[in-house]
Amino acid sequence: MESKVQITEDILATKNMRFVNHLIDIIPQYGVIYGIGYLFLYIGDFSGNYALNNYWAEMSTLEDYFYSYTLMFLYFFTMESLTHRSLGKYVTNTKVIMANGEKPTQVDIAKRSLCRMIPFDALSFLGVNGKGWHDAISNTYVVDINKFEERQKSQDELDQIGAHLLEEN
């Protein structure tokens, strides 16, 4: 049984880690968007029908937001549902957890991913406590894995000592 770890500021990911996460995580998103554009161009070159390419190149701002936010939601929801990490979090060795130290559910991750659509959310972690709006609303935290596991190990050891003392009495 995994013990519950109290989340304190000393095990949270730093603002620099969060910023690096953001920079790395936008790379695959832009890659997919540009990839789709090139795919539609190549389909046009192959078939002689450039309708998809023209649509992609001339879509409205509202359509652009719709596709971009849908892609962003799918990226974060898929990555964090499966691994509790995104590509950026792999690089900085951080992960998403709940306030009690447990793994977030898919509902928690969906809430977190939807909250990323709030304008300026990407910069909200630069505030005083380094917790973004998508963290606060979904009641999740991004922690440094090494510090979190060290805290978890200490908590487990204390629990074992307590259980042993109870057995003796």
Image: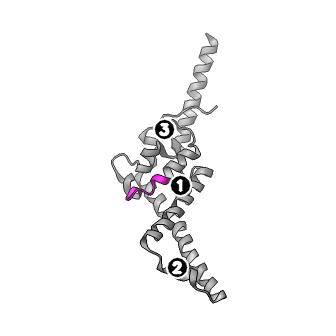
Amino acid, disc 2:
Tyr
Q: Residue 63 location, x and y as percent? A: 47, 70
- Rounded to the nearest angstrom, the CA distance separating label 3 from label 1 is 18 Å
Q: Report if residue 132 is visible in the image.
A: no
Residue at numbered disc 2: 55
Q: Residue 10 location, x and y as percent? A: 43, 41
Q: Main secondary structure of the magenta part?
A: loop
| Placement of 80 over or under 100, stated as above or below | below
- Color style of the picture: one colour
Q: Residue at x 48, y 58 (%)?
A: 21
Residue at numbered disc 1: 89
Residue at numbered disc 3: 99
Q: Residue 55 location, x and y as percent? A: 52, 79
Q: Secondary structure at mark 1?
A: helix
Amino acid, disc 1:
Lys
**Magenta-highlighted residues:** 114-121
Q: Secondary structure at mark 2?
A: helix
Q: Secondary structure at mark 3?
A: loop
| Placement of 164 over or under 125, stated as above or below | above
Q: Is residue 115 magenta?
A: yes
